[in-house]
Image: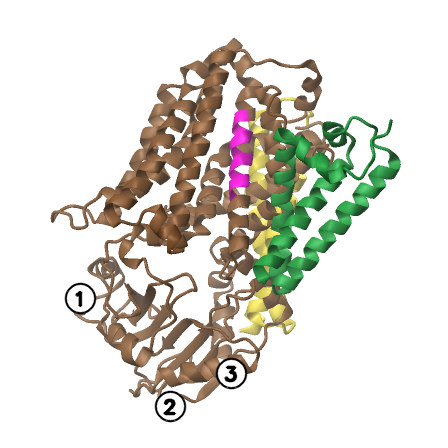
Chain colours: A green, B yellow, C brown
Amino acid sequence: MVNLLLVAAAIFCFLGMAWLALAMDSHWKQVRKDRLTEFRVRLLRSLGSASLLASVLFCLAADHASMAALVWTMLLAASALGVAFTFTWRPRLLSLLVVWAKAAS
Amino acid sequence: MSSASSPSSWQVVSRIGAGVLGGYVFVWGFIALGLSGLYALGMPFHDAEALSNILGFLLYLTLFLWAFSTPYLDRAWLVLVGSGALMAAIAALIQHMLV
Amino acid sequence: MFQNFRLSMAWLHTWFGLVLGFVLMAIFFFGALSVFDREIDRWAIPESRFESQPMPSFDKLLRPVFESMQPSKESIEQMRSRVDGPMPERFETIRSWGAYTTHRDPVLSLFTSYEVPNAKEPEESIRANRTIDPRTGVSLPDDQLKIGSRFFYPLHYSLNFRWLNLGYWIVGFASLIMLAALVSGVVMHRKLFREMFTFRPKKSTQRSTLDLHNLTGVVALPFHFFFAFTGLVIFAGIYFPVSHSQLQQLHDQHEVLEAKETGLPHDRSGEPAQLASVDAMVAEAHRRWAERGMAGEVGFLGLTHVGDSNGYVSVYRAGTDRVALTGEGIHFKASTGEVLREDPPSTTVENINEFLTGLHLQHFRHWLLRWLYVLGGLAGCVCIATGFIFFVEKRKRQYAKEGSQTGRVVDALAVTCVTGMLLATVGILIANRLLPSSLPSGWPGRGDLEQYFFWGTWVLAMAHAFLRSAAVAQAKLNPAWREQCMALVVLAPAAVLLNWLTTGDHLYKTLSNGYWPVAGLDISLLVASGLAFLAARHLRRKALGAPGSVHRSPVLADAEVQHG
């Protein structure tokens, strides 16, 4: 059970970091050809923040609060590294996270 | 203090000395004063020690960076060593009164 | 001296980073290994490859072992100069006995300390220690080196350089510089968030190295900062021994007051006394912890003033379920077993201090967090190593033009402390599996030989790096990088193979038994070998593709000027 919670925390942390990165123009351009509108930036940032929040809640559900704080901080670092390397070597994978945004014609 | 773009070796040595040794003397005084002062004010001994240590290291970092960025190196030496010695002396006085 | 704050920070970051970076590299790498120090011990001492054990019965098992312990000949020799008159045959007055275990320890460490008659300092103690199998009480041979917890771990905080405690001081100074490098790095790096997820390996070496330097520095910034900082806090007593020098009197006065307050005697009474059942005291401690909702195993069992009517027994909990290093100690009168004192709940300052030290010393049970710490430590290594490479890349053409050897030296030292350090690490593991279990008399101990292999490999790697460094002076790549990577490709799996041949524990067996201490290290070695292969292949392509020249796009120039 604890392991499942931690896996969920890790997944949400990665998603959160990825969405926050996609809200940046340079990274959006790595996965999409259309423009990153103001609306999309706000949406991506909210999605990212909500996802990181979910991650911290899963951490808190899994461990004592002091430990959860450490796990979450370290997950942030690991996720950011993971996101950065995915942008470097497999940027297409991250386009899956924005399939909902219809390509502007 | 000159603002030449390539620093002379003496200036570099003096700055490193101020940051490392001056900073050390100041933090020593700070920890001694913090430990004895807080203990005299009624804080448990180990609490006073731990608190002074934790703050002491953060202070050391700040002073170290300051010693490298201040244009007034002589004053930095004076402040660091002077106040460090002063704080250590007060700490010794407090110990003298308590023991 | 500097025109502005930013330039002063850049100077500090570059030059202090360069000088102390070599030390920091070792601190970070062996720190990362120390996360799994106990597991590395299991790999290195095959006799101890069994499940972790709880604290065994004191009355039945530990007591006879403690009673049979005496200081080693070496420690008696070392003590001789601190004593007036001859040394006794046996040390009879026991100051303390201690047994320490964690949730990752199959073996149990025992420590004793004794009063030294006629010592020049009345507080002088002489110590002894032993490691036993807690299931049987049988001791493990003395010369078996616990490579994880007794070599890599002390290397992390003291460089195993004991003389005048100098190793601790170098590490402490390096930690301060690490903190300063982090702050100055943030000041220099203007696009902290804008480039947070950016790594462009296809750009010039200089640019991609800087990307990786920034990436690994920024994303793990909290980790880097808190580990350097808490490392200093843990050893504050060494770096600022205020309460043992200037304020010694205050400290002593407090100790006596504290003993009065806690009811735990500070000194012996001189009256001999029997020892009641310690197992009953441990059971009582378990009951009291359970009452507080903190059930758990015993981590540390300590007896003070053994054999005296003032003797007491302290039972501490193994704090595996939280970060803070608290023991919730319960203390009993040794002769009767009555409870003398229960440690009160921590004060706010204690809570902060215990959290800070606990997050670094990690006594908790949390495999994910341990691996994340390894990742943080390795990110730190990458950050430092890329710092060196950036330093050389940025200046190498200028150095080549001036005929300066600086770049060559820095690059060779970088090889030494990146691939050389990895080779030394694999070297000690290979030596551990190759050396026979009993050596001819007159030879150094087995553990000592393993350490010589470690340092020997490292020195060889360094010599190799310098011998092959001529290319750097012509702004080319040092071939030692690739050659040492290739050596790792071969040697890391060799360690895995030797482990199989000498113990029969191959990966299929350890994995199917779920025995992670050995399987984990074997897999890590294989992964290291694979990564070294990729690196070697990349370096080879680079050497073939662009001999001596690195493409440089003009857009980058301004971004780089600011850095270093």
Identify the secondary structure beneath mark 2: loop
Identify the secondary structure beneath mark 3: helix
Q: The C terminus of chain C lies in which quarter of the figure?
A: top right
Mark 1 and mark 3 in contact? Answer it, CB < 8 Å. Answer: no
Q: Is residue A68 magenta?
A: no
The answer to whether residue C118 is left or right of residue C360 is left
The chain containing the residue under callout 2 comes to: C
Residue A27, image x, y percentages: 73, 31
Mark 3 and mark 2 in contact? Answer it, CB < 8 Å. Answer: no
Magenta stretch: helix, strand or loop mostly: helix
Q: Kindly tell me whether residue C335 is visible in this rendering.
A: yes
Image quadrant in which you'd find residue B97: bottom right
The answer to whether residue C12 is left or right of residue B70 is left
The answer to whether residue C509 is left or right of residue B59 is left
The amino acid beneath tag 2 is Thr
**Tags 2 and 1 on a common chain:** yes
The CA distance from mark 3 to mark 2 is 18 Å
Of C165 and C295, the residue lying toward us? C295
Q: Could you tell which of marks 2 and 1 lies nearer the N-terminus?
A: 1
Quickly name the residue at label 3: C288
Quickly name the residue at label 2: C336
The chain containing the residue under callout 1 comes to: C
Q: Could you tell which of marks 3 and 2 lies nearer the N-terminus?
A: 3
The CA distance from mark 1 to mark 3 is 47 Å
The amino acid beneath tag 3 is Arg
**Tags 1 and 3 on a common chain:** yes
